[in-house]
Amino acid sequence: MSTIRAAVTGVGHYAPEKILSNADLEKMVDTTDEWIRTRTGIRERRILENGATSDMCAKAIESLLKHRGISAEEIDIIIVATVTPDMFFPATGCIVQEKIGAKKAWAFDISAACSGFLYALVMGAQFVETGAYKKVVVVGGDKMSSITDYTDRNTCILFGDAAAAVLLEPSEDDSYGLLDYRMYSDGSGGQYLYMKGGGSACPPSHESVDKKYHYIFQDGKAVFKVAVVGMADVSEEIMERNNLTGADVDWLVPHQANLRIIDATASRMGLDASKVMINVDRYGNTTAATIPLCLSEWWLDGRLKRGHRVVLASFGAGYTWGGALLRWSLESPGKKS
Ligand code: COA
């Protein structure tokens, strides 16, 4: 029986223009550029001033469609990974569908925080691999600025806004596409990274606003310790399962939360820094958008090429984490002017 693999056949991203630099944050909270850079690797992040997560997702998908040369009406499914949906319902996926005019698609959201894109990618691939659908858009988008407390120096330095999307289609050659994945959750980690207010456990009230329950809470040290192990373990597992050494991997695409976590993962994989996609310095942690944002930027400037073996790895709230192995099938568009 021949295997249908889901290959990435299109990619696109959108990052808002407004930049919030470390120097700007120095004026807002008790912090320094030096502290932020040495602890996280972040120099600046983007902020969406007007609009919602769906607007960024729509722009990312429109860019993807333009590169791929197809219309929105050809999309079968839209899966949006986000923790900052426009609203609880309808799904941001449906709002995006309306905005881009993907009239024939069905659409929904998934919530897996910083692992959201990877979870959605693996889920989207199933629809292609079973032969049920042929064009599945997976988009990771988060307007983290909408749930960030800009008086809390522990969290406000970390996050930014962006969206990025990939198109999955059946691969013409089964040596290309999503070759392997391993996904994990551990609900005992929920207490270290969450947003308490707004849901059924703690509906919005004057009290929930006063107590700042509608903002991100993170115990950074606790999350750091498990993230560093979780992302390295799963990346190593993906390599072992596929008999790969560092020399066989062309790119590691890690979730962009903290440069120290990324470095530790690359080092465990035996990968040179030149094979690691890093843009956390320019965007901070954009949650579900980090991994496709890297893929889109590296593809656009020609560094990510057809045939490359790419390991994706993430860790986020839940806890959720995972790793995937892709063989990149898209031809490079060459350097953009
Ligand atoms: N500027 C200056 N000082 C700050 C600061 C800031 N922006 N934020 C915190 N500090 C202070 C703390 O108050 C603390 O001071 P204290 O020792 O007097 O209490 C000190 O710096 C050290 O804080 P700590 O939390 O131990 O720093 P850290 O080295 O762990 O780095 C993070 C903090 C958030 C950068 C780091 O823990 C991290 O990246 N965690 C994981 C994030 C992640 O991967 N999330 C998962 C996916 S979203």
Image: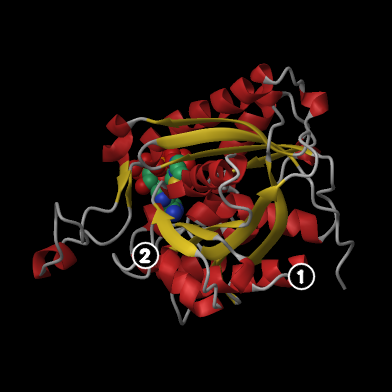
Farthest residue to the bottom: give it: 50
Mark sitting on residue 69 = 1
Left or right of 19, for residue 63: right
Q: Where is residue 72? Give x, y as percent.
A: 61, 72
Q: Quadrant of the N terminus?
A: top right
Q: Where is residue 132? Give x, y as percent.
A: 56, 47
Instruction: For ligand 1, tell me if the residue under mark 2 lies within 8 Å.
Output: no
Q: Where is residue 311? Give x, y as percent.
A: 68, 35
- Of 188 and 267, nearer the camera is 188
Mark sitting on residue 91 = 2
Left or right of 37, for residue 52: left
Vertical order, 226 against 196 (above or below): above
Vertical order, 126 against 283 (above or below): above
Give the residue at x 22% y 53%.
Answer: 196
* Secondary structure category for the residue under label 2: loop
Give the residue at x 78% y 33%.
Answer: 175
- Of 49 and 244, nearer the camera is 244
